[in-house]
Image (cartoon, rainbow, N blue to C red):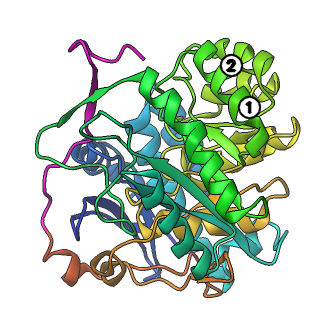
């Protein structure tokens, strides 16, 4: 059996997705997510112009060899575009391997380590009372964990707070929109938010919060210390992770668990953070960290250092990536939690899938492979639409420096 075709499909059923479809000489197909939010066409070109021609004639069963071939053979290693393209190939090959074996992918990864995958949803609102009402909706749906974000008083917009609550999409314009940011006001409102959530819902519900890289290490340490009494499940992306020594300073000031890594694309981005136990959850994803093969490598390293998984799962990850993530989540021993932002009805129609939500857990498909497909005819009805993530400026008009 050999690879005979590799096709790149760009579609926008409410937001942009890039998908790689690989076909073998036996007619078996596999698909992989290749979406890089705001830079989708860069990955599409990388795949179409530089990777797909290399796949024709290769043995689809040689997943590890193909991964190494694409990673080492390009000379220019790593980076989000390269690793997202490699992830698409890797995920599609795992899909094919599962179909050939007649098994869901998680069985090929060692089988179940748990009965279901605990997920969290996003409760957000302009005011704290609005957030509390959104949390109640998720609790009623059976969620065991909820991320809470609220508007910052005095600011016109706050990243992480959306108009459409169940289908949050931060990419909002053909050119990046700009918002004003005030760290001082933000640091005042977050402890109030947590106090209100615990007062209404108690301590049995897991509560998470995303800082979106907007603090300095000492500010993050102070916020973590103030939140400790409310027992957050985690404080996500408190600072940018380029200067990883900053996480040592956070550790010195708080025992609030720290999660980071959704923008990481290789094991080398998080090796120090994991080895020095400076974080508690690694947020890397199948699509942005080199596929199932490489993300498993990251998770195995994390398991040696008491770091659990908590993969990113926003709407810019298609159902293809979500399905792949669930198979890996179900198998690894150090699973922590999985972000789960529901896709729109249009997206679900373009990407029919077998995973399902029940009692606070997501369950992957039991079909051979990943259990997800793409309806190419329907995808063709939704052409690419430029959309970018917003950027922040401080109240004095300068760009946020971190």
Where's residue 95, x and y in %? Answer: 55, 71
Q: Is residue 113 above or below residue 36?
A: below
Left/right placement of residue 134 relative to residue 54 reads right
Q: Earlier in the sequence, mark 1 or mark 2?
A: 2
Q: Secondary structure at mark 2?
A: helix
Instruction: For label 2, count other residues whose C-alpha is less than 10 Å away and answer few (under 14), some (14-19) or many (20+).
Output: many
As rendered, which of 394 and 324 lies closer to the eye?
A: 394
The label on residue 247 is: 2
Query: Is residue 194 covered in magenta?
Result: no
Q: Secondary structure at mark 1?
A: loop
Q: Which residues are magenta?
A: 383-402
Where's residue 52, x and y in %? Answer: 34, 53
Left/right placement of residue 399 relative to residue 272 reads left
Q: Is residue 223 above or below residue 197?
A: above
Left/right placement of residue 375 relative to residue 220 reads left
On the image, numbered disc 1 is attached to which residue?
279
* Residue drawn where x is 40% and y is 84% of the image: 352
Q: Is residue 59 above or below residue 188?
A: below
Where's residue 250, x and y in %? Answer: 70, 19
């Amino acid at each position: 059996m050999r690879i005979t075709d590799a096709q790149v499909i760009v579609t926008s059923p409410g937001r942009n997705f890039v998908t790689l479809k690989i076909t073998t000489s036996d007619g078996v197909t596999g698909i992989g997510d290749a979406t890089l939010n705001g830079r989708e066409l860069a990955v599409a070109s990388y795949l179409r112009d530089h990777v797909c021609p290399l796949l024709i004639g290769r043995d689809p069963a040689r997943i590890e060899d193909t991964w190494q071939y694409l990673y080492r053979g390009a000379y220019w290693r790593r980076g989000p575009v390269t690793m997202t393209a490699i992830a698409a190939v890797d995920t599609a090959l795992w899909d094919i391997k599962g179909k050939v074996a007649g098994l869901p992918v998680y069985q090929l990864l060692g089988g179940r380590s748990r009965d279901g995958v605990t997920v969290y949803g996003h409760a957000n609102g302009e005011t704290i009372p609005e957030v509390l009402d959104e949390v109640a909706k998720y609790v009623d749906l059976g969620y065991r964990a909820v991320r809470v974000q609220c508007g910052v008083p005095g600011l016109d917009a706050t990243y992480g707070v959306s108009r459409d609550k169940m289908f949050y999409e931060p990419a909002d314009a053909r050119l990046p929109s700009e918002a004003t940011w005030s760290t001082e006001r933000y640091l005042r409102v977050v402890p109030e938010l947590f106090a209100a959530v615990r007062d209404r819902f108690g301590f049995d519900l897991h509560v998470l919060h995303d800082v979106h890289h907007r603090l300095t290490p000492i500010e993050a340490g102070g916020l973590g210390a103030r939140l400790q009494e409310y027992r957050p499940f985690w404080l996500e992306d408190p600072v940018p992770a380029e200067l990883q020594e900053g996480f040592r300073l956070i550790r010195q000031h708080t025992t609030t668990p720290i999660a980071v890594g959704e923008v990481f694309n290789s094991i080398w981005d998080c090796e120090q953070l994991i080895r020095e136990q400076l974080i508690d959850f690694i947020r890397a994803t199948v699509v942005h960290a080199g596929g199932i093969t490489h993300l498993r490598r990251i998770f195995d390293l994390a398991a040696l250092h008491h770091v659990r998984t908590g993969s990113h799962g926003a709407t810019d990850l298609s159902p293809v990536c979500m399905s792949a993530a669930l198979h890996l989540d179900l198998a690894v021993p150090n699973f922590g939690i999985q972000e789960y932002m529901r896709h729109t009805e249009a997206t679900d129609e373009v990407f029919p899938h077998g995973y399902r939500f029940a009692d606070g857990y997501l369950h992957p498909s039991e079909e051979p492979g990943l259990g997800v497909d793409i309806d190419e005819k329907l995808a063709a009805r939704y052409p690419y639409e430029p959309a970018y993530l917003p950027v922040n400026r401080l109240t004095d008009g300068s760009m946020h420096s971190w």
